[in-house]
Image: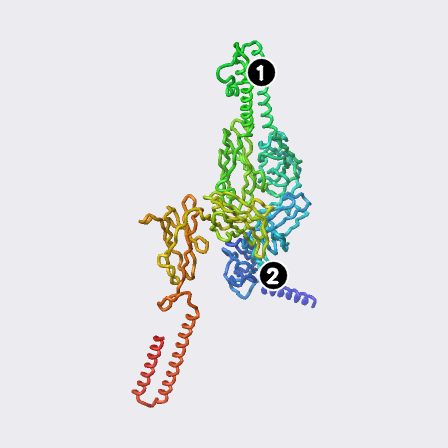
């Protein structure tokens, strides 16, 4: 009995396992997304349902999300490509499978997979505080912030291009937008990698913003520290090139340089030296102020895990090179003057000098060969001319001093400019031009302030350098300097700073000219820049002939609909005419601006004699009728312009000379639907934003076309309405009378069914006549 009991239990357990398998409990597939479950809008994603068993037909369905997207019921072997995705693709998906022979033998559904669609809103910004270089066991805060008031932020981490984890936090709202602080640590090597963040809203959980720019977190302190040294010493002349050497007896694959805790560039491969050590030589940008550097070692298979940092290398900056050059030249000059004075005094005491004809001192010859001049002094009889010699020596010394200062770089400062503008839209290019104005023919460009993640451009070029496509990291203050190819230490002065602004980081604001963009000479206009984004600064720029003229900056004011700044312009002169745009930005990121607003053209009027404006078909126009307006002047304008309610209409028309010697242009405005007032102006091609005084106003009234009879638009609208109501009432009355007569006749005919065919035909004829009568009545209404 015991054996039988055990066998029955074993058989029951096996039967239970088979039942569970058939019901799908042990056949649950797994659903995954490649390359990631976060899919940028417009791209594709591959969903893979791995069954792990004999089930070979897979079905995918959508559990939650936008119901407009149909459930996917396709038969697939394992993978399904979806896209290009839209917002409707966001949601929770599952899959299940079955064998081809038994449709009812289904697997369990997979675990849910959330598909998130990114790129719906503008990207936030991600910062590593205090630095992206984090010592093993310490902590770092990743701060995700945006000018958009998101209520949720999501932080994602990646390693070797594979998404590792996602963390979500509620946003904190502040005056300039929203943010969330993600604490990381105490860190281990597993925390190293690339991080990005997104903004979103809780009511749309499957929609994220565009990804922030990535931040690479490097974990330091895992290997022995290298050493860092400056090959030319730790005191550097301002603007001078320097070479920093990172050395280790550890066989690192890569060396990395940091300044103020921020990595500089992507690192350099290690090279083995003759002594058996490993090293790399870095060429940072020329220093203009003291900085502290460190270096690290790493291996290729763990590029985000670095060694301990080297001991800090402090480089101080000296500007004594030019001063020393000046002192040496001045000392030589003073020695020469002293020798001249001694020789001349001795010669004068012997009576051997007389006043020569012409200048006693040839300044240019003394500049070139002062010693030769001393030996060539005439020693002949004559009277002393010490005063003349003294004056000439002073003049010569002044010229020599100017040349010395120029050679030391004080008077050969280059000028740095950007084309087409120092405001560069994100993703476009900019050309730097460093004009040396001198014999220096090698130019170097470097970055003084801004995002330190971008390397200073230390390329050798003649005059122009093209950079781009630009990103926010390119924003900053740049300078350039130059030198002769033969004399690397004979440097020019540094150019004045040039600020490069990257625009297009945020959505564009709106610009309005109040009360109108047509401004009479010496009057005022207000340019109002406003946005729904919480900017704290607005910038107004002016352009003329495509060239940027000026920029004005104001702090933002808060109002119910957003933020704005009012830029008062005037009393205006012709110099104020031109095209204006505005930008929004934040004080903490001064090199990053919004997209440019739509332009506003400010026209200055009242500089020339007014033309005259007339309507060729009279001042009364039928509603929606085409009209022709003629602008005429005896002044030889190049262009005529039309305005309505103080707003320019179109781009203007070229003038034509008529037979009587006047100049005119005919305008064809849109058909009028209500009364309007027009004016016209004249202008010249070389000053298209400066217009004449306006013509006298032309008022056009509108009439309404009804039954081919024109009725004045000044008549009350109630007459027209009453006429329409009367027509409707008459039509309804005739219809009801016709229906009543038809019913009456039909009843009469039905009662006399037994009559002959002739009588039936007569009845039908009466009905037809009645219908004809009804049609005639309608026609006469």
Find residue 688 and report its horizontal and vertical position in percent: 43, 46
Would you name the residue on which mark 1 appears? Answer: 341
Find residue 273 and report its horizontal and vertical position in percent: 60, 31
Dot 1 and dot 2 residues touching (CB under 8 Å): no
Q: Could you tell me if residue 557 is visible in this image?
A: yes
Q: Could you tell me if residue 52 is visible in this image?
A: no
Disc 2 packing (10 Å; few <14; some 14–19; many ≥20): some
Q: Secondary structure at mark 2?
A: loop
Residue nearest the viewer, comparing 649 with 659:
659
- Residue at image point 33% right, 79% down: 772
Would you name the residue on which mark 2 appears? Answer: 26
Which residue is outermost to the right? 2
Give the side of residue 751 with respect to residue 582, left or right: left
Looking at the rendering, in which quadrant would you find the N terminus?
bottom right
Indicate which label's residue lies in the foreground, 1 or 2. 1
- Residue at image point 50% right, 56% down: 83
Residue nearest the viewer, comparing 463 with 647:
647
């Amino acid at each position: 009995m015991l054996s039988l009991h055990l066998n029955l239990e074993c058989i029951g357990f096996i039967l239970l396992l088979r039942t569970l398998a058939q019901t799908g409990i042990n056949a649950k597939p797994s659903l995954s997304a490649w390359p990631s479950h976060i899919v940028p809008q417009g791209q594709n994603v591959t969903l893979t349902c791995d069954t792990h068993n004999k089930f070979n037909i897979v079905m995918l369905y959508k559990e939650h999300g936008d119901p407009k997207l149909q459930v996917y019921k396709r038969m697939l072997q394992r993978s399904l490509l979806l896209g290009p995705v839209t917002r409707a693709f966001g949601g929770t998906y599952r899959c299940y499978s079955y064998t081809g022979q038994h449709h009812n033998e289904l697997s369990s559904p997979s675990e849910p997979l959330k598909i998130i669609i990114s790129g719906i809103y503008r990207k936030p910004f991600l910062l590593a505080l205090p630095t992206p270089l984090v010592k093993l066991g310490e902590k770092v805060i990743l701060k995700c912030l945006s000018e958009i008031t998101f209520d949720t932020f999501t932080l994602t981490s990646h390693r070797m291009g594979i998404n590792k984890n996602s963390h979500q936090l509620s946003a904190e709202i502040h005056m300039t937008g929203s943010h969330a602080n993600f604490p990381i640590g105490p860190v281990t090597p597993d925390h190293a990698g690339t991080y990005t963040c997104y903004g979103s809203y809780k009511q749309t959980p499957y929609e994220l913003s565009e990804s922030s720019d990535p931040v690479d977190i490097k974990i330091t302190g895992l290997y022995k520290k290298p050493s860092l040294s400056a090959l030319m010493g730790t005191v550097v002349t301002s603007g001078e090139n320097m070479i920093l050497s990172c050395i280790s007896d550890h066989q690192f694959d890569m060396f990395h340089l940091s300044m103020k805790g921020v990595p500089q560039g992507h690192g350099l491969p290690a090279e083995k030296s003759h002594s058996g050590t490993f090293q790399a030589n870095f060429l940072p940008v020329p220093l203009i102020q003291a900085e502290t550097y460190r270096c690290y070692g790493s291996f290729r298979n763990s590029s985000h895990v670095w060694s301990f940092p080297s001991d800090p290398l402090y480089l101080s900056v000296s500007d004594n090179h030019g001063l020393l050059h000046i002192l040496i030249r001045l000392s030589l000059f003073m020695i020469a003057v002293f020798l001249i004075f001694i020789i001349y005094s001795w010669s004068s005491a012997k009576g051997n000098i007389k006043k020569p004809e012409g200048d006693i001192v040839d300044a240019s010859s003394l500049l070139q060969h002062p010693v030769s001049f001393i030996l060539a002094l005439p020693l002949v009889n004559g009277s002393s001319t010490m005063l003349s010699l003294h004056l000439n020596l002073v003049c010569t010394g002044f010229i020599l001093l100017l040349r010395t200062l120029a050679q030391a770089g004080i008077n050969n400062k280059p000028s740095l400019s950007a084309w087409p503008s120092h405001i560069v839209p994100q993703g476009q290019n900019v050309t730097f031009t460093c004009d040396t104005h001198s014999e220096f023919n090698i130019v170097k460009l470097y970055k003084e302030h801004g995002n330190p993640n971008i390397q200073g451009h230390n390329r050798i070029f003649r005059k122009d350098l093209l950079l781009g496509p630009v990103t926010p990291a390119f924003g900053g203050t740049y300078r350039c300097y130059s030198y002769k190819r033969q004399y690397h230490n004979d440097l020019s002065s540094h150019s004045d700073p040039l600020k490069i602004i990257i625009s297009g980081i945020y959505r564009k604001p709106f610009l309005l000219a109040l009360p109108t963009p047509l401004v009479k000479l010496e009057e005022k206009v207000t340019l109002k820049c406003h946005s729904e984004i919480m900017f704290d600064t607005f910038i107004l720029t002016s352009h003329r002939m495509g060239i940027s003229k000026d920029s004005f900056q104001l702090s933002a004011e808060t109002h119910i609909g957003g933020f704005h700044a009012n830029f008062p312009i005037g009393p205006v002169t012709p110099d104020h005419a031109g095209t204006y745009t505005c930008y929004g930005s934040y004080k903490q990121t001064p090199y990053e601006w919004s997209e440019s607003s739509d332009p506003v053209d400010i026209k200055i009027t009242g500089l020339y004699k007014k033309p005259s404006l007339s309507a060729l078909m009279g001042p009364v126009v039928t509603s929606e009728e085409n009209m022709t307006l003629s602008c005429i002047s005896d002044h030889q304008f190049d262009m005529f312009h039309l305005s309505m309610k103080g707003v320019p209409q179109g781009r203007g028309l070229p003038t034509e000379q008529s037979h009587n010697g006047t100049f005119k242009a005919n305008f064809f405005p849109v058909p009028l639907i209500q009364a309007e007032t027009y004016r016209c102006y004249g202008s010249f091609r070389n000053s298209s934003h400066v217009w004449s005084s306006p013509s006298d106003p032309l008022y056009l009234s509108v009439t309404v076309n009804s039954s081919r009879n024109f009725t004045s638009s000044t008549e009350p609208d109630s007459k027209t309405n009453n006429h329409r109501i009367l027509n409707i009432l008459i039509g309804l009355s005739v219809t009801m009378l016709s229906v009543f007569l038809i019913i009456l006749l039909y009843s009469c005919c039905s009662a006399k069914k037994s009559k002959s065919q002739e009588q039936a035909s007569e009845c039908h004829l009466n009905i037809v006549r009645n219908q004809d009568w009804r049609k005639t009545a309608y026609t006469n209404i």
